[in-house]
Amino acid sequence: MLSRSRKITLGTKEWADSNVNCYFGCSNNCRYCYAKKMAIRFKRKTEKTWKIMEPNLKAIKKGYLKRKGRIMFPTSHDITMESLSSCLIVLKKIIDAGNEILITTKPRLSCIKLICNDFYKKKNSIQFRFTITSKNNELLKFWEPYAPLFKERIEALKFAYHKGYKTSVSIEPFLDEDPYTLVDILYPYITESIWIGKMNYVFSKNKTPKLINFYNYIDKINSKENLLRIFDMAKNYDNSIVRIKDSIYNFLNKVNLK
């Protein structure tokens, strides 16, 4: 049974009190990206220009004060070798102001190594939340075409974990029919939490025979039956570690009310 009294939060509020970004666009160019959807809707970017990352000079140059609660960085772009130098500048300002920060990224090992080494003395203020949505590289290449593949992401997780950083993972959207096969691989390197969520947005549907199976597969794994199974299986794990995201709660609650 789903809890009717559960408080449902929206967007980044599920994880942090505020967020900071310092680029427009994201070179990962994920097919389900909500930030891309909104940028195109409000004419800040186009489908073709979204993958071109442009520095937000105002956000990079400004000062940052101590904020109430935790800050998530970044939320609408990723940390890549292209954006790393500016991201390091912003991270340093946020951390030096005494803030607690949640670094969210589809991790590139080279970037994570530099971040870990640069902020080692401040590591107690930092938690990593790595997005690792599948162990299947074919799925990753389709849905997250320019993001790192599975091996690099888990190596980045292991590196941060062995460096003594707080580590967590987002499996949102889960791309494997059974995300717990991935949970079992990640579990030994987690100090905080693993979050499982569903795909909420599909940016465009290329209905060519070669690609349509990817979209049909998402419809299948996001079925009520599979989501209920995922919800129920969470009971087999420590609920302080494995957590179901509001994207699944929202969907199941809507279905149950029909």
Image: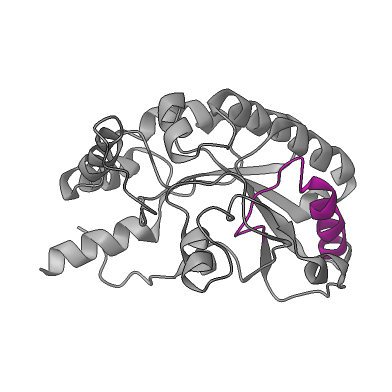
User: Can you tell which quarter of the image residue 45 is in?
Assistant: bottom right
Q: Is residue 183 visible?
A: no
Split into 4 quadrants, where in the image is the N terminus? bottom left
Q: Is residue 172 magenta?
A: no
Residue 176: give x, y in percent of width and height: 35, 33
User: Can you tell which quarter of the image residue 12 is in?
Assistant: bottom right
Left/right placement of residue 99 relative to residue 247 reads right
Q: Residue at coordinates 39% horizontally, 50% vertically from top-left?
A: 197
Q: Is residue 60 above or below residue 187?
A: below
Q: Residue at coordinates 53% horizontally, 69% vertically from top-left?
A: 13
Q: Is residue 88 magenta?
A: yes
Q: Nearer the viewer, residue 81 or 64?
A: 81
Residue 198: give x, y in percent of width and height: 35, 50
Residue 54: give x, y in percent of width and height: 72, 58
Left/right placement of residue 6 relative to residue 96 reads left
Q: Is residue 229 above or below residue 125?
A: above
Disc count in the image? 0
Q: Is residue 109 visible?
A: yes
Left/right placement of residue 52 relative to residue 98 reads left
Q: Is residue 234 above or below residue 246?
A: above
Q: Is residue 207 above or below residue 126?
A: above
Split into 4 quadrants, where in the image is the C terminus? bottom left
Q: Residue at coordinates 76% horizontally, 40% vertically from top-left?
A: 81
- List the single residue furthest toward the left: 258
What is the span of residues highlighted in magenta in the rendered image? 73-95
Residue 76: give x, y in percent of width and height: 60, 59
Left/right placement of residue 120 relative to residue 192 reads right
Q: Nearer the viewer, residue 138 or 93?
A: 138
User: Can you tell which quarter of the image residue 9 is in?
Assistant: bottom left
